[in-house]
Amino acid sequence: MARKPHIQDSDEHAPWPQPEDLRQWLNEESRRVMKEAELRIIDATELVTGFLTGHISREEAQERSAEYHRRWGDALRDVPELKDGMTAQEIYAAQREHREGQTAAKKWAGKPSSDRGGR
């Protein structure tokens, strides 16, 4: 699940948001996203390089790959098919469509079988 923005008011009596609140949030969000990308790339590169150079076995590569996915999950996990050249708006639409489908599937799965057309 995505982390919700944590923004504190610079002045508890001022209406939220103030420009400084958003600036601080953007700086923190950028710092976190860049660090995550850096660490993901390092982990993935070490895994692939280790296997391709023979420093780790196929079994160890499988274990490390599983650990990578447990740690990081899929990038843009709500975009099942990321195509080269997709615009930001196309990615946002794919995310929205995927999430709405997940929500509908959960609602459907929670109904008694008689409500789903079952016997």
Image (spheres, rainbow, N blue to C red):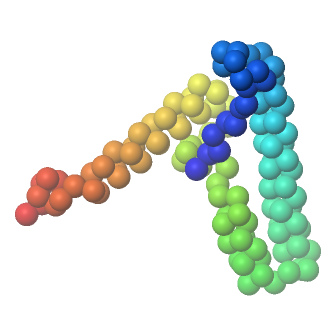
Residue in view at x 81 percent, y 28 percent = 24
Q: Nearer the viewer, residue 47 or 54?
A: 47
Q: Nearer the viewer, residue 115 or 24?
A: 24
* Corner quadrant of residue 119: bottom left
Horizontal side of residue 79 vs 105, given as left or right: right
Residue in view at x 76 percent, y 21 percent = 11
Q: Nearer the viewer, residue 69 or 15?
A: 15
Horizontal side of residue 18 vs 117, given as left or right: right
Q: Is residue 12 above or below residue 41?
A: above
Res 81 seen here: no
Residue in view at x 58 percent, y 50 percent = 1
Q: Is residue 26 above or below residue 106?
A: above
Q: Is residue 3 above or below residue 20?
A: below
Return the x and y of residue 26 as percentages of the image width and height.
Answer: 78, 29
Res 32 seen here: yes
Return the x and y of residue 107 as percentages of the image width and height.
Answer: 30, 49
Horizontal side of residue 49 vs 85, given as left or right: right
Return the x and y of residue 49 as percentages of the image width and height.
Answer: 89, 68
How many discs appear?
0
Return the x and y of residue 29 as percentages of the image width and height.
Answer: 77, 36
Residue in view at x 81 percent, y 61 percent = 44
* Corner quadrant of residue 92: top right
As drawn, the residue found furthest toward the left would be 119
As drawn, the residue found furthest toward the front would be 13
